[in-house]
Image (tube, grey):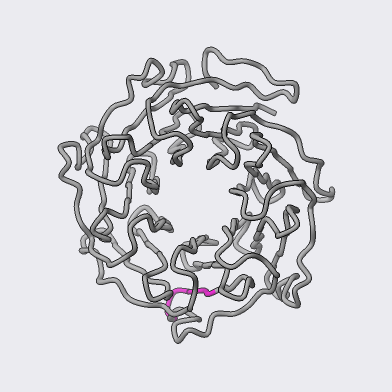
């Protein structure tokens, strides 16, 4: 990926790419094309910072030269980043006043919020709430978050229009629960949250219809987890959904769905894919095409581990991707191509580290 780094025994390469941030804070990262990666962190001064990498170049912020793009947030706040196209990026953060703030960028322009002037798009959320954001087409954005009353709220935008008012689409969840959102196609959206009873709940939307769980009637797809546990979901094709959670026994559990079938774990029959982690460890998943899945978990042993699946094969064993100095550090992963994986953490020293693999 970059020009330096230290190889690890499992074929990954790890590199420090600078920054002086709150230790262990979440890193947002995305790839708007196969040759470009952008990373974002909310710093100790409450501003959001950006570093980017392009093929043939090193990270722009490697010598602690991350660029400020403004904002005035709680240090270390979660930044949610979306690429609507290779020429459009959008960032979202919940402010200390509970409102959601946005900054955008387009090719040829600078960040809209670079002088702290991020746009408020309203909302009333507990500070620290994580926003889930999707772009189902280059002209659409959808946001989701759990409100103070435990319901899930959404706001949407389309080219030529303003942001909609936030509206409840039902559910009754722990207030700090994270919504995971997936776009199976431009006409299908799916949401997942772990409920107060430890089961994972699902609501869906399709063009021309309303949210299935709008009257709090979200569908249980089973599981017996710690209430509010992080759920990681992915769609590897318009006809497939895969959901992952770290269980109370430290193993990773999977539930899947395909068009015409029911959820595999609907009767609390989630399948274990192993692992030895701590309950509620940070987890993320990505799809490399319709026949490859990759799961990453940040463990209490100060290591980020990886397991992969390919169509026709079983899940691989767990391998260590990177070692940190913090237990259960927030982990972010992306696939620039089917052969390129990049994993990001912010370590105890406040620096951002990236590990990459080309296979």
Screen quadrant of the C terminus: top right
The percent position of residue 174, horizontal first and vertical second, equals 49, 70
Q: Residue visible at 32% across and 67% down?
A: 155
Q: Residue visible at 57% across and 38% down?
A: 335
Side of 32 where 328 appears, left or right? right
Q: Residue visible at 32% across and 51% down?
A: 93
The stretch drawn in magenta includes residue 205: yes
The percent position of residue 106, horizontal first and vertical second, equals 27, 39
Along the line of sight, which residue is nearer the eye, 185 or 163?
A: 163
The stretch drawn in magenta includes residue 11: no
Q: Residue furthest top?
A: 4
- Magenta residues, start to end: 203-209
Q: Residue furthest right?
A: 313
Along the line of sight, which residue is nearer the eye, 138 or 68?
A: 68
Q: How many marks?
A: 0
Screen quadrant of the N terminus: top right
Instruction: Examine the rendered structure and indicate whether residue 334 appears above or below residue 321.
Output: below
Q: Residue visible at 56% across and 72% down?
A: 195
Task: State the image quarter where residue 317 is shown.
Answer: top right
The percent position of residue 176, horizontal first and vertical second, equals 45, 63
Side of 169 where 160 appears, left or right? left
Side of 167 where 161 appears, left or right? left
Side of 69 where 43 appears, left or right? right
Task: State the image quarter where residue 61 is shown.
Answer: top left
Instruction: Examine the rendered structure and indicate whether residue 61 appears above or below residue 230.
Output: above
């Amino acid at each position: 990926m970059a020009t330096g780094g230290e190889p690890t025994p499992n074929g990954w390469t790890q590199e420090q790419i600078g920054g002086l941030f709150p230790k262990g804070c979440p890193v947002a990262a995305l790839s708007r094309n196969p040759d470009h990666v952008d990373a974002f962190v909310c710093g100790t001064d409450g501003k959001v910072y950006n570093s980017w990498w392009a093929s043939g170049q090193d990270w722009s912020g490697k010598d602690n030269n991350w660029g400020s793009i403004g904002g005035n947030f709680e240090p270390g706040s979660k930044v949610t980043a979306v690429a609507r196209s290779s020429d459009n990026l959008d960032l979202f953060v919940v402010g200390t006043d509970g409102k959601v703030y946005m900054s955008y960028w387009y090719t040829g322009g600078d960040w809209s919020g670079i002088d702290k002037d991020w746009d408020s798009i309203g909302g009333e959320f507990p500070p620290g709430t994580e926003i889930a954001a999707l772009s189902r087409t280059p002209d659409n954005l959808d946001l989701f978050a759990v409100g103070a009353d435990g319901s899930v709220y959404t706001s949407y935008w389309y080219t030529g229009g303003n942001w909609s008012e936030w509206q409840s689409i039902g559910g009754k969840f722990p207030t700090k629960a994270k919504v995971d959102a997936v776009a199976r196609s431009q006409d299908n959206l799916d949401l997942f949250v772990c409920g107060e009873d430890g089961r994972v709940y699902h609501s869906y939307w399709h063009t021309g219809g309303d949210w299935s769980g709008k009257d709090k009637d979200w569908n249980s797809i089973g599981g017996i987890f710690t209430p509010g546990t992080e759920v990681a979901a992915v769609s590897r094709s318009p006809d497939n959904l895969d959901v992952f959670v770290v269980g109370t026994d430290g193993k990773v559990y999977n539930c899947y769905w395909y068009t015409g079938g029911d959820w595999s774990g609907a009767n609390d029959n989630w399948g274990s894919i192993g692992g030895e982690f701590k309950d509620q460890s940070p987890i993320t998943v990505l799809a490399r095409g319709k026949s490859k899945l990759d799961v990453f978990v940040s463990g209490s042993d100060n290591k980020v581990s990886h397991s992969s699946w390919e169509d026709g094969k079983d899940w691989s064993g767990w391998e260590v991707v990177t070692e940190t100095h913090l237990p259960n550090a927030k982990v972010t992963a992306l696939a620039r191509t089917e052969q390129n994986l990049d994993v990001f953490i912010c370590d105890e020293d406040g620096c951002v580290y990236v590990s990459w693999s080309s296979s």
